[in-house]
Structures are given as structure tokens and as C-alpha cells.
Image (tube, rainbow, N blue to C red):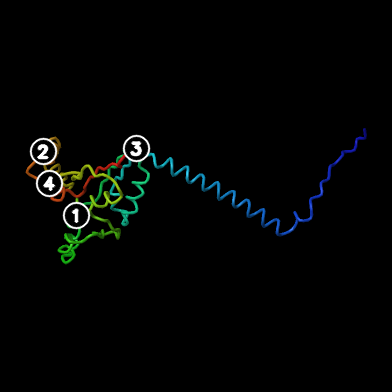
Amino acid sequence: MSGALDLLVVKLPDFVRTTTFRWISIAFVVCILLFSAFVYWEAATYMLARMDGVIAEDGALSRHLMAEDLAAEIARVLRPGGELLACVDSLVLGMAMLAEQRHWAHLTDLPHAEVVLIPWPDGTITRCFGAAQLYDLLSEQGLEVTSIRPRTVLSPSTVDHVLRQQPGAMARLVRAELQAGQDPAAGGNADEAFGISLVATARKPC
């Protein structure tokens, strides 16, 4: 046996070296990649649609001006029986902001508006909701709304003022907050009467 290295030379057919074959090869690879991406997306969508719960905190639905799109996405990812806890800016906050900016004409029209967009001094815009508007937003996405209530009865400015005057008054403020939130005299529309934020709970039907 000689010490020379035997090489096996394979000559490819001529059509393999043609431009047409190269384009066909590229198209085939692209199809494989697209199919893989489709399978991955469908699997990810299936997995995401098994969420036990979603928390839309910090006014997420208010910061997203097209809140309907975000609510639809929340409903999509929840599993049947999954629950939502959402906090939004209320009409009370909207009215306070308009009054602070002296937009009196807009303030008088606010109770009749279907969508309430309020500008902040820094240029950002928030979407404010009444209880009925928030209920419609969630129920239109197929969610069963179980409660809507103010996040707090006492405003942050009230709490700050009292604590500045009486630093040890936190316990009394907590008791006042709990008592006001359970006050039956507030009626069925208490959530529209006070509170700069509304908290809603909802579930996806089984």
C-alpha cells in the first residue's frame, strides 16, 4: 500500500451549479424556516393561552389608549376560568386633571364622552374610565366582570395632608379607609363617586 493519500473526487451534476438550482435551494430553505417559525408561534400561542391570571397594574389599560386591543390580548392568553385584576384611572382623576388645567368646556362634556383621554402636563395622555365604561371594555372581550370598586377612598393628597399634620394618624386613616369602602350608604355607584383609580376583577368563562 502506497503512502499517498487517496482522494475521492465527486463531480456534481452540471445542473447543481446553475443559478436556477441555487434559487430553488434558497426558496426551499426559506420555506423550512417559515414553517418552523409557524410551528413555534402556534406552540407559543397555545402555551400563552394557559395563563391562570393576569395583573394589569399601574394603569396599564389607561396608558394603552387603544385599551380594547390590550383587553382582547388579555382575554386571549387567559385559560378558561383564568382571572384578571386590572387597575385604571377613573373619571374622578380625569375631572381633577381638567379642572387643574382649567379646561372647563371639556369638563362639562366629560360625563357624556364615550372615550375620555386626559393630557398630563408632561405631554403624556391617559385614558380614564367610569365604572360602566370599564365594565363594557372587559365584557366586550368575553370576560365576566365580578367587581369594580375604587382602589382607595381617601385620595393620596388627603392622606399626605393628614400625615403632615399628625404623623401618627396612619392607623386611623386605615380604619377610615376600610369603613368608607364598606359603607352601605354609598350606594351602587360608589365606584364613580370617589377614588382616582378603579380596580376591576374579571374571569374568562369556562
Task: Using the image, tell me which numbered label, if any, was put on residue 179.
Answer: 2
| Alpha-carbon span between mark 3 and mark 2 | 32 Å
State the residue in front, 190 or 104: 190
Judging from the image, what secondary structure is the residue with disc 1 in? helix
Q: Secondary structure at mark 4?
A: loop
Give neighbour class at mark 2: few <14, some 14-19, many 20+ (Cα, 10 Å): few
List the residue tagged with mark 3: 52
Amino acid beneath label 3: Asp
Residue 50 relative to residue 119: left or right? right
Percent x, y for residue 102? 17, 64
CA–CA distance in space, label 3 to label 1: 30 Å
Q: If you read the primary sequence from the N terminus, does the residue marked by circle 3 or circle 1 appear first? A: 3
Q: Position of residue 111 (x, y in %)?
A: 16, 59
Mark 4 crowdedness (10 Å alpha carbons): few <14, some 14-19, many ≥20: few
Q: Which mark is residue 188?
A: 4
Q: Earlier in the sequence, mark 2 or mark 4?
A: 2
Query: Mark 1 or mark 2, which is nearer the start of the sequence?
Result: 1
**Image point 13% across, 50% down: which residue?**
193
- State the CA–CA distance, disc 2 to disc 1: 23 Å
Residue 53 found in image quarter: top left
Circle 3 SS class:
strand
From the viewer's perspective, tell me whether residue 183 is left or right of residue 68.
left
Label 1 sits on residue:
91
Name the amino acid type tagged 1: Leu
